[in-house]
Amino acid sequence: MTTNQNGLIGILTTNATGAAMDAASSRAKLNSAEIAHSIEKSFLAGAAKQKSEELEKEKENNLKQKEEIKDLESIHFASKSAAKDNEIVQRYKILELEENNKKIEKSLKSSAERVEQYEKFLAKPLKELFTEHEQLEAAYKKQQEILLDWMASQNAYKYLAQTYGKEKGMESSDIHKEAARIEPFYIEHIKKNGI
């Protein structure tokens, strides 16, 4: 393979990389805020649902225990001396379980209220979120700066590939065709090996 051919392959690979990265960065720039917004909403809703399910299971277990305790009460009434002691213990346990159920119900209500608050918060436009939370706006701006820098560097590589390709006697359309031909192989390489 000649030096010119090696140079051309390098230029075309860079051009393909630039094209793929341009497309990916455009999609990332357009969707990054919405994706972050959606991920956060999904995460919070999932966490609240999981907590609600756990509390519901605990409530069911407590109800089963309560029923078991009531069954035990009827058995122990056969013995008068044991019945009195047992009755006191059983009533105490029932009171504990009832109190625990009240706490679970309160926690379930609180979880539902928090989910509703998060949903209302996440339904707001980005501008409004930024005014309420300066750190969110700063993080978003930093992310946009990183994407802009990356896009600028990709465009510089693309320009450089075009320049070298033209110096080698290639037309712009030839350079684009070669980049399109190489792009699927490069994308597969990224999937297997990372960037």
Image: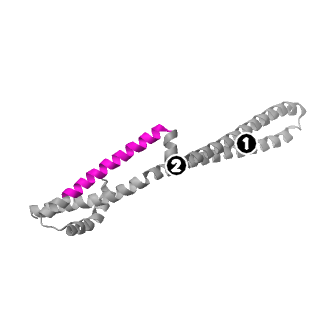
User: Residues in magenta?
Assistant: 133-160
At label 2, which amino acid type do we have? Pro
Q: Identify residue for label 1.
A: 62
Percent position (x, y) of residue 129?
Answer: 51, 43
Q: Quadrant of the N terminus?
A: bottom left
User: Disc 2, disc 1: CB below 8 Å?
Assistant: no
Asked whether, in this view, residue 121 is left or right of residue 139, the answer is: right
Q: Nearer the viewer, residue 154 or 185?
A: 154
Residue drawn 47% across the image and 38% down it = 134
Q: For numbered disc 1, what is the local secondary structure?
A: helix
Residue drawn 14% across the image and 60% down it = 7
Residue drawn 73% across the image and 40% down it = 101
Q: How many residues crowd around disc 2 within 10 Å: few (fewer than 14), some, or many (20 or more)?
A: few
At label 1, which amino acid type do we have? Asn
Q: Identify residue for label 2.
A: 125
Percent position (x, y) of residue 37?
Answer: 50, 49
Depicted 181 relative to depicted 115: above or below? below
Percent position (x, y) of residue 152?
Answer: 28, 51
Asked whether, in this view, residue 167 is left or right of residue 66, the answer is: left
Q: How many residues crowd around disc 1 within 10 Å: few (fewer than 14), some, or many (20 or more)?
A: some
Asked whether, in this view, residue 106 is left or right of residue 78, the answer is: left
